[in-house]
Amino acid sequence: MYKESDFLEAKSLLSQLIACPSLSKEEAGTAKIIQDFFTQKGIESHFYLNNVWAKNTHFDPNKPTVLLNSHHDTVKANASWTFDPWKATEIDGKLIGLGANDAGASLVCLIQTFCSFYQEKNLPFNLLIAATAEEEISGKNGIEALINSPDFPQIDWAVVGEPTDCQLAIAEKGLMVIDAVAHGKAGHAARNEGINAIYVAMKDIEKIENFQFEKVSPVLGPVKSTVTIIHAGKQHNVIPDTCEFTIDCRVNECYTLEEILKILQNELSSDLTPRSIRLQPSRIDEDHVVCQAAKKLGMVSFGSPTLSDQSLLACPSVKIGPGHSGRSHTADEFIYLDEIKQGIQTYQNLLVETSIQYQHKS
């Protein structure tokens, strides 16, 4: 099924996307590029906020619907770039540019794969492609808004494109950021009075460092809670009556975020306020048809510690894509050209094998 023209089109599209700045909430330019690409291919697409989506020609409401999704927003370019981050530079078998690895390559490979199956009549499932916004900030106008929009079809399961070396992430840790406030009593630092909120916070922070959550995931490991920010005091001679600190909680699929919050509230004396409980952990059953297809293709399954739009999907999902996660958000971010080819072939083979698995089930 794979053709060299698939790679050339994907590479060209990725180069255009790199050349158009698309920080989170500022993705209108890349959304138009993607919509124009679909138009040139004769594919009707839809625009919602800065999200672009389309469905296959022979969409049948009686069939299960599979979502192919990745994002077209990027983080800011850091000061260490030596190449122009908004120019696709081809050198030494690489394509260098902001968003090339995270997650432009995955997105263009998914788009090219969707185009390959767009007019296929005999698929046992429907296909949706969605190029979404605000993933890098877990924003509310990205995939979450799209799947809740009135015209978007209900989805049964999803393939989320992120750099995984084209291996299959079957689970992903959720994220909860908690703002904590330890309380004391103000007093003069020269006298033995007051209750130092910093010392109160230190006791809670020590508990967080040593606390072990009971349930450990076989694929994601333990829940990890880390204090990453602390702030207290306004002047040297005043005992602070409050100490604020931030807890970063990476949660395995054995718990909901609400359960983790309750456990921490029972363990700590500080007031805890979560910034959000939207970014839940996920795990797909390894007997799911897409997991069986991946196994047939020899893919390695693993649990991912990094966050993606999987956390905002209520349906079963897997995360897979070309590139390496360690390159994301780094200076001179790049994707190997061969990885783009690998990504298209991987997605195409996965859908072909999944079709076979559906036929075996029936």
Image: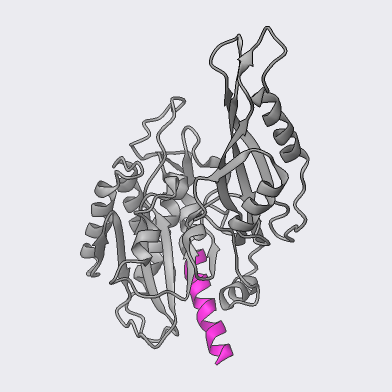
- Quick check: is 360 in the magenta stretch? yes
Q: How is the image coloured?
A: one colour
Q: Which residues are magenta?
A: 346-362
- Evaluate whether residue 6 shows in this view: no
Question: Looking at this rendering, what residue extends furthest in the top direction?
Answer: 190
Q: Residue at x 65, y 26 (%)?
A: 197
Direction bottom: furthest residue: 362
Q: How many marks?
A: 0
Q: Nearer the viewer, residue 192 or 79?
A: 192
Which quadrant of the figure contains the C terminus?
Answer: bottom right
Q: Quadrant of residue 226?
A: top right
Quarter of the picture holding the N terminus: bottom left
Q: Work out whether 44 lies above or below 271.
A: below
Image quadrant where residue 152 sits? bottom left
Residue at (61%, 60%) from the top-left corner?
Answer: 256
- In x, y percent, where is residue 16? 30, 47
Is residue 217 visible in the rendered image? The answer is: yes
In the image, taking residue 270 as reference, residue 75 lies left or right, namely: left
Indicate the quadrant where residue 155 lies.
bottom left
Residue 140 sits inside the magenta stretch: no
Q: Residue 83: give x, y in percent of width and height.
A: 40, 30
* Horizontal arrangement in the rendering, residue 30 relative to residue 289 (left or right): left
Residue 55 x, y percent position in the rendering: 32, 73
Secondary structure mostly seen in magenta is helix
Q: Is residue 38 above or below residue 122?
A: above
Q: At x 58% / y 78%, what residue is drawn?
A: 289
Image coordinates for residue 278, horizontal then vertical, percent: 49, 56
Residue at point 56%, 74% (across, down): 290
Look at the picture and state if 198 lies above or below 1: above
214 horizontally vs 263: left or right: right
